[in-house]
Image: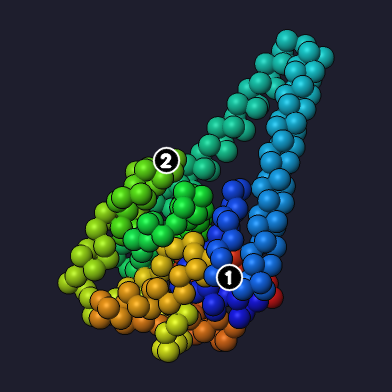
Amino acid sequence: MVEQIENDQNTLDNPTNDNPTPLPPTLSKNAQKKLLKQQKYEEKKAQKKAAIKEQKQREGERKRREWDEKLANVSEEEKLKLIESRRELRKERMGKRSEEREKKIERLMRAKEEGQKIVIDLEFSDLMNPSEINSLVQQIMYCYAVNGRCTSPAHLWLTGCGGEMHAPLLRIPGFEKWLIEKKNRSYIEALQDQKENLVYLTADAETVVDELDPKKIYIIGGLVDRNRWKGITMKKANDQGIQTAKLPIGSYLKMSSSQVLLALSTYYLVEFDLSRCFAS
């Protein structure tokens, strides 16, 4: 598993894909078998998700029926008390959610000044089909959600948001209100005054990142490539004259679990569930 993760460090690999991509003719038989296995896994995952959704709907209907029956079997006075009690409970829950949202906003606002800068490079849309772009967007949503739950979140950047990425990103519910940096320009243009601090994370790099440097801006390739474009991020970084590095996955990291989470949540969360990582 560790070897697989290290090989996929320069991509945000595909979490779900309801429309499997045709097998690239350049893949070896072994690679094709692995890809087919992954596609079958994704199909089962989608079916499981649909089953869970249906189960939740049935559960909701059951609770509504029970509530209606409960009200029908009590006096008018007791009915009013039950309704008021339920209303107060909902109000309390909404208050807690509002408080959590406010705390999340505070953390993300503070991250703009203090958080580790992590950039997702979205300039690879021309190399992906619509299904893969959708998969990438789903991963970005997941990364934002995970980062927002961190006690010390990263300050996330999306660069190259124009072109084919523009419309899919705008379809994300609430995307316009996300507390991150969203740039249509490339990271080289958006961060040209900090070029010396840019570090592209790629499995092909020789330098290993043993400890996060708060002054550095780590870049992740937003490419659902199925290994069709090996070495592309390394070449891009070299052509641009910026630093490259890779993470020592499987080795001891001189970071707290929250630091690892915020750094890696935008890295390969879908292919490798971090909750399993910390549990193992």
Image spot of residue 45 (x, y percent): 69, 52
Quarter location, residue 52: top right
Image spot of residue 242 (x, y percent): 28, 80
In which quadrant is the C terminus drawn? Answer: bottom right
Mark before the other along the chain sequence, 1 or 2: 1
Compared to 53, does 250 lie above or below? below
Compared to 99, does 263 lie above or below? below
Kind of residue indicated by mark 1: Leu
User: Which residue is the site of mark 2?
Assistant: 171
Query: Which residue ends up furthest to the bottom in the rendered image?
Result: 206
Kind of residue indicated by mark 2: Arg
Q: Which mark is residue 27?
A: 1
Q: Are marks 1 and 2 in contact (CB under 8 Å)?
A: no
Query: Which residue ends up furthest to the front in the rendered image?
Result: 25
Q: Can residue 84 be seen in this snapshot?
A: yes
In which quadrant is the N terminus drawn? Answer: bottom right
Closer-to-camera residue (93/226): 226
Q: Which mark is residue 134?
A: none
Q: Residue at x 17, y 72 (%)?
A: 193
Compared to 230, does 273 lie above or below? above
Closer-to-camera residue (24/209): 24
31 to the left or right of 182: right
Compared to 50, does 185 lie above or below? below
Image spot of residue 194 (x, y percent): 21, 74
Q: Residue at x 38, y 56 (%)?
A: 125
Closer-to-camera residue (97/232): 232
Is label 1 in a helix, a strand or a loop? Answer: loop
